[in-house]
Amino acid sequence: MVSWSEFAAERPDLAEAGARLFRQFSVALLATSGEDGGPRMAPVCPILAGQHLYLIVAGHTPKFRQLQRDPRYALHAFLGANDEEFQVRGTAELVTSEAERSTVHQAATFSFKVEDPVFRLQVGSSLWCHWERVGQPDTKAVRQRWLAKRL
């Protein structure tokens, strides 16, 4: 797993597309797993701040408990033009540093409670896709994938 900035250094094209889509709508879909192992999905507001991608999650919500129990996540941006899509997967880490939490709070563009938990999202893989020549007989999907190097 790597930070957002390490991912961006390796694949600036994918990171730029992801950042653009996350900022365009300010909302993305977070996939986690429930206690029964089943998939769960919830809307969240991704925050790019400093070197990382973050989420502020209300402490009373199921998504908080799910990330505490099993930190694996998938985060999918809303679709852009030509069904452009972007997804990252990895692990979420609870942020305890007040300085780092403050940086995230300053970057947030939505209302939240300062005591709400903040998660730093480590990136393990990404997928970016869009459609070329939409509506034409030769329409095709263009997909770019990235996987963090394993040590």
Image: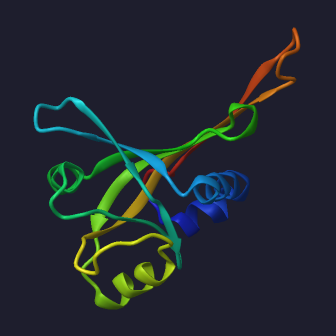
Q: Is residue 63 left or right of residue 145?
A: left
Q: Which residue is drawn at 47% across and 60% down?
A: 46
Q: How is the image coloured?
A: rainbow
Identity of the residue furthest to the top in this view: 137
Asked whether, in this view, residue 16 is left or right of residue 110, the answer is: right
Return the residue nearer the eye: 11 or 63: 63
- Residue 151 falls in which quadrant of the image? bottom left
Please report the residue visible at 44 percent of the width from the left and 85 percent of the height from the top: 103
Work out whether residue 113 or residue 135 is closer to the camera in this orientation and state it: 113
For the point 62% across and 38% down, the residue is 79
Left or right placement of residue 89 versus residue 24 in this view: left
Q: Is residue 139 above or below residue 64?
A: above
Q: Is residue 140 above or below residue 13?
A: above
| Residue 40 rendering spot, x and y as whole percentages | 27, 36
Residue located farthest toward the left when viewing the structure as drawn = 35
Is residue 31 placed above or below 92 in the rendered structure? Answer: above
Outermost front residue: 111
Is residue 57 depicted above or below 66 in this figure?
A: below
Q: Which of 142 and 11 is in front in this view?
A: 142
Quadrant where the N terminus sits is bottom left
Q: Which residue lies furthest to the bottom in this view?
A: 99
Q: Which residue is drawn at 88% across and 14% down?
A: 136
Total number of numbered discs in the rendering: 0
In the rendering, at what x and y percent does residue 91 appear?
34, 54
In the rendered structure, the answer to whether residue 12 lies left or right of residue 139 reads left
Report x, y in % for residue 143: 69, 32
User: Where in the figure is residue 15, as x and y percent of width and height?
Assistant: 64, 57
